Image (spheres, rainbow, N blue to C red):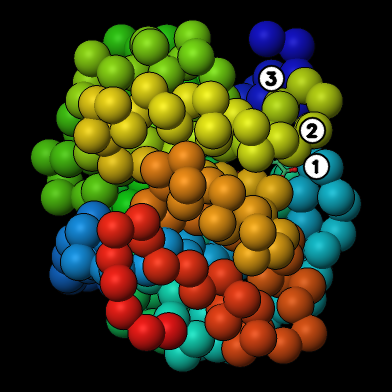
Amino acid sequence: MANILTAILAVKHEEIIKLKKLKFPNYQSEYTKRSLLQSMKESQKVSIIAEIKRASPSRGDIDRDVDPVKQAIAYEKNGAAAISVLTDKEFFKGSFEDLKKVSEAVKIPILCKDFIIDEIQIDHAKRAGAHIILLIAAALPVKRLTELYRYAKSEDLEVLVEVHDEEELQAVLPIDPELIGINNRNLKTFEVNLEVTERLGSQLVEMDKLFISESGVKVRHDVERVRDAGAKGILVGETLMQAENLNHSFKEFGVILKGENYAR
Ligand SMILES: O=C(O)c1ccccc1NCC(=O)[C@H](O)[C@H](O)COP(=O)(O)O
């Protein structure tokens, strides 16, 4: 597994040691559930999970100085189903502080997009205001992923389980994840290819599993393509972060699900 994930996970191990020594910061005290799953099940359109992404290993700086609150309010106003906040500092320049501010500013569910390998990160994500956490199959042995999945569920959080290939998909299926994310970005080459969604999606459609397509969605045709592959949602970072007119981008991405029939 010699890829960017190896470097990221090494930093996460250090962070976890520090988090375990820390007293909880004074985050929100009360947790109120916000459900992405419910809104996806009720939606007639492809659900858009819009990301706050200041920087990334593949792109470098995207918008280091973005005001996450303004961006999140604009996402919500334009119809995002949820907001993904990258909280990793070292590689994505995000923070739990970003997540906290965003969660307080909007009413839609918040996904903590981080590299979670320990319960303490789930505790911090929840206390900062997350409603959904991400578990990445490539980051964990399946036994550990299952433990963290169950822990998050016991905390009343929703879980997005992310896979990049067939092997990872087969490994996580026994968990029966409530929501699967097919990530189109190859972690070794950073190449993004929507064929990954088409390939893995066809298996998930047969099993009637709810899934979204992550990374590399740039234009309406991309949304139609992953919708046709069975995806009920998309997770979009860079394109929305760089959009000159978010209203226009959301209209462009406003694609009706197969079998649904109503005016745009
Ligand atoms: O974006 C990266 O460079 C990256 C590198 C290594 C691990 C994860 C990475 N990104 C996290 C994501 O999954 C994306 O931020 C998300 O799917 C949105 O992707 P995009 O719309 O292509 O910005």
Crowd tier of the residue under label 2, counting other residues whose Cα lies within 10 Å: few below 14, some 14–19, many 20 or above: some
Q: Position of residue 203 (x, y in %)?
A: 38, 23
- What amino acid type should be assigned to the residue bearing mark 3? Thr
Q: CA distance from mark 2 to mark 3?
A: 14 Å
Q: How many marks?
A: 3
Where in the figure is residue 86, as x and y percent of width and height? 58, 55
Q: Can residue 32 be seen by looking at this rendering?
A: yes
Query: Which of marks 3 and 1 precedes in the sequence?
Result: 3
Q: What's the residue at 45%, 74% (across, down)?
A: 80
Q: Is mark 2 within 8 Å of ligand 1?
A: yes
Q: Which residue is mark 2?
A: 190
Q: Residue at x 20, y 66 (%)?
A: 42
- The residue tagged with tag 2: helix, strand or loop? loop
Task: Describe the element under mark 3 as helix, strand or loop.
Answer: helix
Q: Which residue is mark 3?
A: 6
Q: Are marks 2 and 1 in contact (CB under 8 Å)?
A: yes
- Give the spatial CA distance, label 1 vs label 3: 13 Å
Looking at the rendered structure, the kind of residue marked 1 is: Pro
Comes first in the chain, label 2 or label 1: 1
The N terminus lies in quadrant: top right
